[in-house]
Image: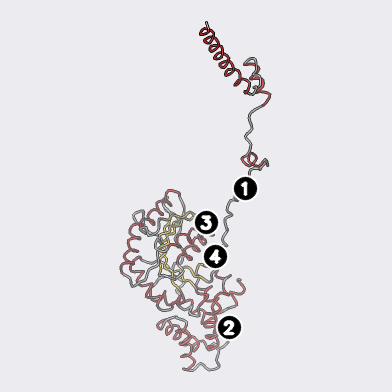
Amino acid sequence: MKEYLLIALALLGVLILGAIGLVVPRLRRRPEPPLPETEVETRAEEDRAGPPVEAPEAELSTGVLVEPPTVVEAPAPVLEVPEPAAGRLVRLRSRLSRSQNVFGKSLLGLLSRDHLDEDAWEDIEDSLITADVGIDATREIVDRLRERTRVLGTRSATELRALLAAELVNALDPTLDRSLKTAPKDGVPAVLLVVGVNGAGKTTTCGKIARVLVADGRTVLLGAADTFRAAAADQLETWGGRVGAEIVRGPEAADPASVAFDAVKRGIDTGVDTVLIDTAGRLQNKVGLMDELGKVKRVVEKHGPIDETLLVLDATTGQNGLEQARVFTEVVNVSGVALTKLDGTAKGGIVIAVQRKLGIPVKLVGLGEGKDDLAPFDPAQFVDALLGTEPLARDA
């Protein structure tokens, strides 16, 4: 009997412990808010609350509302308007002050002597030779001056200035064609190839030529075929960007002929008037470099003939510039000269020497570091600027 009683007590204890285990966890749970009774009530609650708003990150972390930054659009680049090319040489006459000291003051002073003896004429010859006119051209100019002053008996400063101006203009051969061939033909743009030695200011001059063409109403594309000087393409791109001219460039050390070819092809595709190709500076005595320049010319001519090949010469190099011009002419058939840095030299006579020796017209002259200091060359205006004659002062 006792055994049954113990078994009953044990079962009762187990039941009591199980009941406690089920009740205690329920007492520890936190009550949850009541759910909506129907799906319609749930949607009504969401509609009243509106769409969820995502708070800025800073607001979640600090509690401070951070406004998003204001986006300011960069203004469109303003294109520059180059000053008209016509009349630039007249406006820039003061830049020839150093050469004016030789031609205007020295020569006119010598010619104005009371008695022009042999010593005086020798001094005149020396002045012209010092100005890099060249020996042959100097002798011809002086011989003609001597003859005309003897026959005409001219003695006044005005008459002597007129005689000297006429002889200098004649030595520059005003009959030469100095126009730049920049007009497209049959849907193909005119191609201008710019060549020259290192340090002549070639890339800068190329950029200034682009401004001359834009000022004259031409649309221009620039080809950066100087792939050996890292800054050359960047420099040319800066020049082109100022006037809205597109530039075609290749990777550093790319094949210059390939870049030049692509530039002309792009010019044809876009329908521009003129493609202006800048080439790497070369020494005229380096056969390999000159052969490469010849390759550029041949590759470009697969699109058609090159309309203009401009040789950039530094006026301060003097007679050495003639040798440069001669070798470049043999390789790429130079059709014109852009003479730079005339404002920094008293040797303005190099213009005469280049034309006399090579028969190549000077088409452009650089008279300063300004963006529009490259001027189309006109013999009469140039001589008037050198001599400071009255007709130029009235025209200005």
Instruction: Give the residue type that dot 2 points to.
Output: Thr
43 shown above or below 334 = above
Q: Residue 322 occupies which quadrant of the picture?
A: bottom left
Residue 241 — which label?
Answer: 3
Q: Give the residue pinned by disc 1.
A: 72
Give the mark nearest the N terminus, 2 or 3.
Answer: 2
State the separation of the CA atoms marked 1 and 3.
Answer: 22 Å
**In front of the other: 254 or 51:** 51
Q: Give the residue pinned by disc 4.
A: 371
Q: Residue 370 occupies which quadrant of the picture?
A: bottom right
State the separation of the CA atoms marked 2 and 4.
Answer: 36 Å
Q: Residues within 10 Å of mark 2 (few under 14, many from 20)?
A: few
| Quadrant of image for the C terminus | bottom right
Secondary structure state at the residue bearing disc 4: loop
Instruction: Give the residue type that dot 3 points to.
Output: Gly
State the separation of the CA atoms marked 3 and 4.
Answer: 13 Å
State the separation of the CA atoms marked 2 and 1.
Answer: 65 Å
